[in-house]
């Protein structure tokens, strides 16, 4: 099984920055992709940024130029550096991991999420 844990969410003022981290652990054989999603109150979950096995990072339009996704393959970790935050960035941010384990093929795993609130 794979456990995904996110941390780093907080209350921040507009224009501020936050760094979210995600760590995957368990009987992981290989991680195929890692990504960040967010869900604001009353809205559907949406993709923020994602990096697959090709190495290319996909960013949602609203994230381009403000958010930076990075992945540490050795630590099974992904980070999301968020700059120039806006009130509309307020949401629960969740990490999504696609991984194969010692006992199963590719599975889709999610963390519990971390709250980001942008407000003055």
Image (cartoon, grey):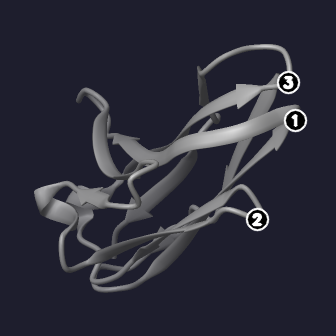
Residue 116 position in % (x across, y down): 47, 58
- From the image, state whether disc 3 or disc 1 is nearer to you: 3
Residue indicated by mark 2: 74
Measuring from the top left, give residue 8's x and y in whole percent. 63, 65
Q: Which residue is mark 3?
A: 102
The quarter of the displayed image where residue 117 is located: bottom left
Q: Which residue is mark 1?
A: 26
Q: Rounded to the nearest whole Å, what is the CA distance between mark 1 and mark 2? A: 14 Å
Q: Quadrant of the N terminus?
A: top right
Q: Residue at x 38, y 53 (%)?
A: 54
1 or 2: mark nearer the eye = 2
Earlier sequence position, callout 2 versus callout 3: 2
Q: Is residue 1 above or below residue 86?
A: above
Mark 3 to mark 1: distance in Å? 10 Å
- Residue 61, given in percent of the width and then of the height, sits at 11, 59
Q: Is residue 115 above or below residue 104?
A: below
Which residue appears at 37% of the width and 43% of the height? 38
Q: Residues within 10 Å of mark 1 (few under 14, many from 20)?
A: few
Of residues 118 and 73, the one drawn nearer to the viewer in this rendering: 73
Disc 1 element: strand
* Closer-to-camera residue (79/101): 101
Label 3 sits on a secondary structure element that is: loop
* Quadrant of the snapshot with the C terminus: bottom left
State which tag comes first along the sequence, 1 or 2. 1
Q: Tell me what residue is drawn at x 64 percent, y 36 percent.
A: 111
Query: Residue 10 in the image: x percent, y percent?
Result: 56, 66
Secondary structure at badge 2 equals loop
Crowd band around label 3 with a 10 angstrom C-alpha radius: few (<14), some (14–19), many (20+): few
């Amino acid at each position: 099984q794979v456990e995904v844990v996110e941390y780093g969410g907080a209350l921040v003022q507009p224009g501020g920055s936050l760094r979210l981290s995600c760590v995957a652990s368990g009987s992981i054989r290989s991680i195929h992709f890692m990504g960040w999603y967010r869900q604001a109150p009353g809205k559907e979950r949406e993709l923020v940024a994602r990096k697959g096995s090709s190495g290319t990072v996909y960013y949602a339009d609203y994230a381009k130029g403000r958010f930076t996704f990075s992945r540490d393959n050795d630590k099974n970790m992904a980070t999301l550096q968020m700059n120039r935050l806006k009130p509309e960035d307020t949401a629960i941010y969740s990490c999504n991991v696609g991984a194969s384990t010692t006992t199963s093929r590719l599975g889709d795993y999610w963390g519990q999420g971390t709250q980001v609130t942008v407000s003055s």
